[in-house]
Image (spheres, rainbow, N blue to C red):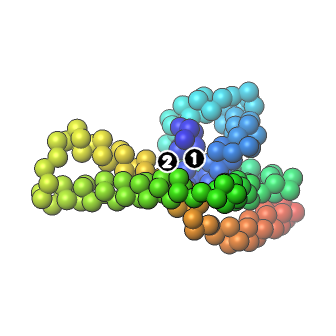
Amino acid sequence: MSILKKILGSAAPVLATALGGPLAGSAVKFLAGKVLGSEEGTEEELAKTIEKWTPEERLALQKLDNEYNLQMLQQGINVFELEIKDRQGAREMAVAAKNLWPQIALAVIYNLGFFGVLLTLIASMGNKLQINSSIKDTLIFLLGVMASELKNVNAFWVGSSYGSKEKNDQQFAALMQQQSRG
């Protein structure tokens, strides 16, 4: 996962999703134009600039996310739909191969690892388990990384709430069009 995608995270979910797929170039170009004043900026330059922003300045990311989402919807592109299609393609490939064991094994190992790290940290908080502070810091970092991807690992099996997201996007697009007229 790119640093910029992590920074955008929940503040700009459409841009963060676009950065992880085929629209990465358009997302970077859009952000660079708005943040750096030139569409020629790179992900690294954007990440360095946005990292220096205050929390108040980072609120602008939500507005930029809304602008980008509206721009994509006006072009008939739904960023989240592309992500869902990618996941569906992976599922279809796994079914066609008639061997789901690699996906099952990876999902089980990932989930066991996540909850193992979580339980280890919880046990260390109650002084039932003594962990070296540097190892504890590493485990906390690892838990954060694993938590950010846990949704994606499990989404292969349980799908997503795409229908709800699509409805919200349509309502958002209608609202933005009303605001631009009035």
Nearer mark to the viewer, of 1 and 2: 1
- Quadrant in which the N terminus is drawn: top right
Number of numbered labels in the structure image: 2
Q: Residue 8 has which mark?
A: 1
Q: Nearer the viewer, residue 127 or 10?
A: 127
Q: Is residue 72 visible?
A: yes
* Drawn side of residue 3 relative to residue 111, left or right: right
Residue at 77%, 57% (x, y): give it.
78
Amino acid at dot 1? Leu
Q: Nearer the viewer, residue 79 or 96?
A: 96
Residue, disc 2: 55
Q: From what the image shows, is residue 2 above or below residue 44? A: below
* Drawn side of residue 87 relative to residue 128, left or right: right
* Drawn side of residue 24 relative to residue 49, left or right: right
Amino acid at dot 2? Pro
Residue 178: horizontal and vertical position, in percent?
83, 67
**How dense is the environment of label 2, judged by Cα within 10 Å: few (below 14), some, or many (20 and up)?**
few
Residue at 87%, 63% (x, y): give it.
181
